[in-house]
Amino acid sequence: MYVPGLIAAAVQVLLVGSAPLAPSATQVRAAFLHAWQGYRRYAWGHDDLDPLSRKPHDWYGVPLLMTPVDAYDTMLLMGLTDEAADAKRLILERLSFDQDVSVQVFEVTIRLLGGLLSAYDQMVKNLTAAQLQEAAKKYFDMSNYARFVLLPETKTTP
């Protein structure tokens, strides 16, 4: 069911400082930071955090950095530049699709590919032409590799 103005209100919550929703935006930002700081403290470099045990969890036995990739664009939208810089550094240093693992295509598509596409979109808005070329080269190299790795999973049999 579509609620008029709901999407606009959600966008305002993400944009810290929007007048009518500033208290809500502050609460959303604080909740995000609380969750991120827990991940950072207990599960840095892994896919996610089990909040009850405070133990890291990797979905496929090896870290694919699901949480940092998925959260990066949200950090940028919320103006969390320090947190985004740390996540970006971790992603660039450690994310590797050179893994011999079976994955859930849907989850990898929405969390990793979607996160990387959104991050790329957010990042290119502030890049110089030279930086844009370098970012595009890294992105296309990564996406071509991901396509090659995922291709067998997308084939269907008659």
Image (tube, grey):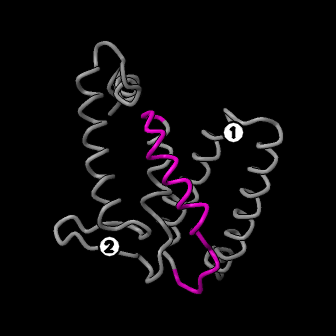
Mark linked to residue 66: none
Asked if residue 124 lies in the magenta stretch, the reply is: no
Provide the residue span drawn in magenta.
Answer: 77-102
Q: Gap between marks 2 and 1, in whole Å?
A: 31 Å
Q: Mark 1 sits on what residue?
A: 124
Asked if residue 88 lies in the magenta stretch, the reply is: yes
Residue at x 28% of width, y 20% of height:
22
Q: Amino acid at mark 1?
A: Val
Q: Amino acid at mark 2?
A: Pro
Which element carries disc 2, helix, strand or loop? strand
Q: Residue furthest top?
A: 19
For the C terminus, the image quarter is bottom right
Mark linked to residue 56: 2
Tell me if mark 1 has few (under 14), some (14-19) or many (20+) residues whose alpha carbon lies within 10 angstroms of its own.
some
Residue at x 52% of width, y 83% of height:
102
Q: Position of residue 139 (x, y in %)?
A: 71, 56
Q: Is residue 136 rendered to the left or right of residue 89?
A: right
Does 77 sit above or below residue 12? below
Residue at x 22% of width, y 69% of height:
54
